[in-house]
Image: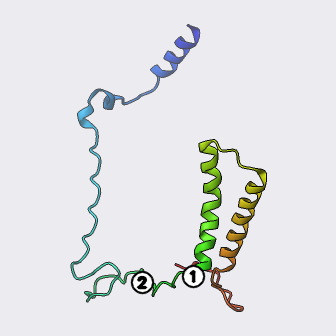
Amino acid sequence: MGEREEFDRIIEGLDLDLGFLDDPSQSEPEPEPEPKPERPASVEYGGSSARSPDVDEEFYRRVDLGPRPPWRRNVILTWIGVLGSPLALLLSSVVGILVPRSIVAALTLVFIASAIYLISQLPDRNPGDDPDDGAVV
């Protein structure tokens, strides 16, 4: 009890205002969050309609994607190789079919070759000595 008595003696000399602990009604109310400004009706998302002069310019610029290139038969076959090989091995293991090693090796090689082919067909986004390596959306 010696430590407790020493602590009480130290505290007796302090002038502490602990009235806020007794009366919870005196606590300050929390400030209400500021409402978000309304978007003017004349501005559409993407920013192509008429604007009032006090509206800041939108930083987003909508870019037309253009037409999709047609699917080529060899690209379809390589996607079948990339997705079908692991799927075939997964289904055979779920069903409980024991697949010979030669077929497992062949499916693995088909997967690797198909993935390499698809990666090699990606378009070059940075031709020449252009120092810009930014993201393409």
Left or right: where 92 falls relative to 54: right
Q: Circle 2 sits on which residue?
A: 61
Please name the amino acid that badge 1 sits on. Answer: Arg
Give above or below for 98 relative to 86: above
- For image coordinates 36% across by 84% down, the residue present is 57
Residue furthest out toward the left = 41
**In this picture, is 100 found above or below 27?**
below
* Percent of width and height locating residue 73: 58, 79
Q: Which quadrant of the figure has residue 115?
A: bottom right
Instruction: Indicate left or right for 49 with 124 as reference.
Output: left
Residue at the image position 27 percent from the left and 87 percent from the top: 51
Provide the secondary structure element on which disc 1 rests.
loop
Query: Outermost residue toward the top?
Result: 1
Residue nearest the observer in this picture, 39 or 81: 81
Return the mark for residue 72.
1
Mark 2: give few (<14), some (14-19) or many (20+) Cα within 10 Å.
few
The one nearer the camera, 48 or 74, is 74
* Residue 59 horizontal side relative to residue 32, left or right: right
Q: Mark 2 or mark 1, which is nearer to you?
A: 1
Residue drawn at point x = 63 percent, y = 41 percent: 96
